Image (cartoon, rainbow, N blue to C red):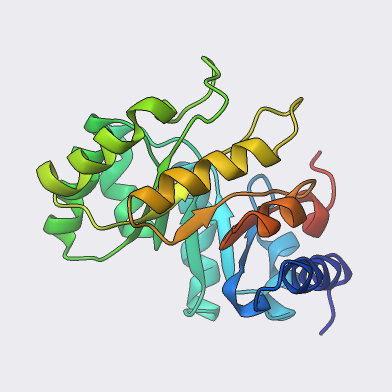
Amino acid sequence: MVHQGLKNVLNGVVAAAQAAGRSPESVTLIAVSKTFDGPEIVPVIEAGQRVFGENRVQEAKAKWPALKIGWPDIELHLIGPLQSNKAAEAVQLFDAIHTVDRPKVAEAIAKEIRRQAKPLKLFVQVNTGREPQKAGIDPDQADAFLRECRDVHGLDISGLMCIPPAEEDPKPHFILLAEIAGRNGLSQLSMGMSGDYAAAIACGATYVRVGSAIFGTRG
């Protein structure tokens, strides 16, 4: 079954990867399904997409357990801010968390990973634009925070995530994230959305988070 929005984005990912001299298989598309309900998500699943992103634990909890009964191979990523008191539910529900950004959250996730004996892909969110209203660790504190995640909390961090300021050229932010990842031995970069995923792929993104280009404009 063909889903035109998904097809267009997948073609765009392939083109961007090839233009950057990379294998398209090195980039994973996360279809961001936040605010969309099951009937709107099912056609994208039926078209073959298996990796989805949600912003809120409670919203994901309300729709994904039922969907995963039919498609148990779906991989679910939390890409929105996580409160430490939601860590138990987040670890249970998600396969990856992209928003580890402060010690209290890292500690809560580590506790739940041990308690539930469930491995997770974990990304530290870096606030590359140093925006006060946005989640994420300051770039100058990223190295120390990564050491704390690993050495104090015993977390296996897979990579880094960022959301550049909406009004700025995203490329310098993508380059900064790649630099921080490189010096910390991290190979996974979660960056790029509907409007800038091609630029993110050119800068090394391994996960791109695309919503509106697949699902259309949210109501």
Please state the total of marks drawn on the protein image: 0
x 75%, y 67%: residue: 13
Does residue 131 sit above or below 179 in this rendering?
above
Q: Is residue 15 visible to the viewer in this orientation of the structure? A: yes
Q: Quadrant of the C terminus?
A: top right
Q: Is residue 108 visible?
A: no
Q: In percent of the image, x 70 and y 48: which residue is there?
A: 193
Residue 82, quarter of picture: top left
Q: Position of residue 169 (x, y in %)?
A: 75, 33
Image coordinates for residue 34, horizontal then vertical, percent: 63, 47
Taking the image as shown, residue 68 lies to the left or right of residue 199, namely left
Rendered position, 80 above or below 131: below
Front position in the image: 124 or 215: 124
The quadrant holding residue 145 is top left
Q: Quadrant of residue 18?
A: bottom right
In terms of depth relative to the viewer, which is nearer, 182 or 106? Answer: 182
Q: Nearer the viewer, residue 80 or 219?
A: 80
Left or right: 16 as drawn, with respect to 86: right
> What is the residue that sits farthest to the bottom in this orientation?
1
Residue at the extreme top of the image, as rendered = 132
Residue drawn at (60%, 44%), measured in percent from left and top?
A: 174
Q: Residue at x 77, y 71 (%)?
A: 10
> Is 151 on the left or on the right of 213, as rendered?
left
**x, y percent for residue 21:** 70, 73
Q: Nearer the viewer, residue 153 or 145?
A: 145
Check the picture and name the quadrant holding the N terminus. bottom right
Picture coordinates of residue 84, whole percent (x, y): 28, 34
88 sits to left or right of 187: left
